[in-house]
Image (cartoon, rainbow, N blue to C red):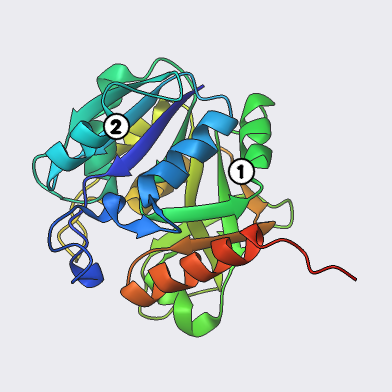
Amino acid sequence: MQAVVLAAGEGTRLRPLTEDKPKGMVEVDGAPILTHCFDNLVDLGASELIVVVGYMKEKIIQHYGDEYEGVPITYAHQREQNGLAHALLTVEEHIDDDFMLILGDNVFEANLQDVVRRQAEDRADAAFLVEEVPMEEASRYGVCDTNKYGEIIDVVEKPDDPPSNLVMTGFYTFTPAIFHACHLVQPSNRGEYEISDAVGLLLESGRTIDAIPLDGWRMDIGYPEDRDEADRRLGDEMEPEAEA
């Protein structure tokens, strides 16, 4: 399965960490965020990494070149950062079948394989890894509503008044149908082409999207303190267990 990594962002909220590098090149536990993303995708059996670059793209291209751990890398260029749906359309010509999508500013130690397995079952048209967060934090994310079968029935992007505390985590699987939906998306109130609006169009067309509960943890590296917390968590996991 091909894997798409969205890594075009500037990371203004991460300054000063992003004064001389794009967001994906900020280091967590001694390695760029993108390295953690790539490691996850290689472990999941990605056949190709398709990386959407934009801000300071040369830093990413020079660092990784044309392959990672033997997996070929293709770069797609998002010349203006106009939202995730806009970014996703830059890879449309490269995608052949179902694919994984990861946001290149997230660090995961979680059950990503469960999402890929669900997509392979052909029961759903897409599958998202979702997480329950404190209600006061939900407005930072795409907020999901689900039915009793664990299927997503609505998604709202960064709402002022979240309808739930169940949020998308930044790891998804899709069929190529998502591209048609992205083409139909109109700019949001934020002036961006939102992935949540594209998902909404998939739902309106009768597509099935499964929500896979997070087992483990993930960090959306939006602020310097998020980087510090991810550093701490990964560092804790690497420490040997104390002898009894």
Q: Is residue 214 left or right of residue 39?
A: right
Q: Which residue is drawn at 20% across and 49% down?
A: 186
Q: Is mark 1 on a helix, strand or loop?
A: helix
Q: Residue at x 31, y 42 (%)?
A: 6
Assign the C terminus to one quadrant of the image.
bottom right
Query: Depth check: 36 or 123 in front?
Result: 36
> Can you give x and y, in whole percent of width and height, for residue 99 in the image?
47, 27
Quarter of the image where one finds residue 241: bottom right
> Can you give x and y, in whole percent of width and height, for residue 19 in the image?
13, 63
- Alpha carbon separation for disc pair 2 and 1: 23 Å
Q: Which residue lies furthest to the left in this view?
A: 79
Is residue 116 positioned above or below 158 on the image? above
> Can you give x and y, in whole percent of width and height, for residue 22 in the image?
20, 52
Q: Which residue lies under the disc numbered 1?
A: 112
Query: Depth check: 193 or 227 in front?
Result: 227
Q: Which residue lies under the disc numbered 2?
A: 64
> Can you give x and y, in whole percent of width and height, for residue 141 in the image?
41, 66
